[in-house]
Image: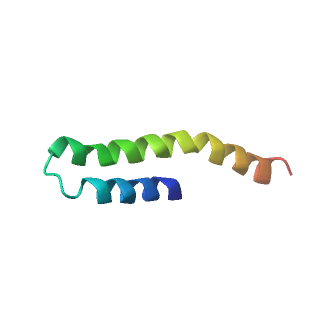
Amino acid sequence: MILTYIVVIIYSYIVRNYDNVFLSSLVPVIGFTLSTLSLKLVRKIWEKKFISK
């Protein structure tokens, strides 16, 4: 989840000087994609910690 915010901050910093709507609309898409990709890793860690007891 922290990776999502870091990527969005970097991306926002890069595209702040552009007035292109399409570049700005990529922020939610990038955030959603990174969040869903990281869910599998978070679930494995959670299962190891709480279910394997």
Above or below for 23 versus 13:
above
The percent position of residue 17, horizontal first and vertical second, equals 19, 57
Residue 3 in percent (x, y) is at: 51, 54
Position of 2 relative to 51 (above/below): below
Residue drawn at (13%, 51%), measured in percent from left and top? 19
Q: Is residue 29 left or right of residue 48?
A: left
Instruction: Pinpoint residue 11: horizontal percent, then vertical percent.
Output: 34, 53
Q: Residue furthest right?
A: 53
Q: Residue at (46%, 53%) from the top-left corner?
A: 4
User: Which residue appears at 31% of the width and 60% of the height?
Assistant: 13
Who is closer to the viewer here, 33 or 7?
7
Observer-nearest of 10 and 48: 10
10 vs 19, left or right, is: right
Q: Work out whether residue 1 can be spotted.
A: no
User: As rendered, which of 31 and 51 lies closer to the eye?
Assistant: 31
So how many labels did they put on this image?
0
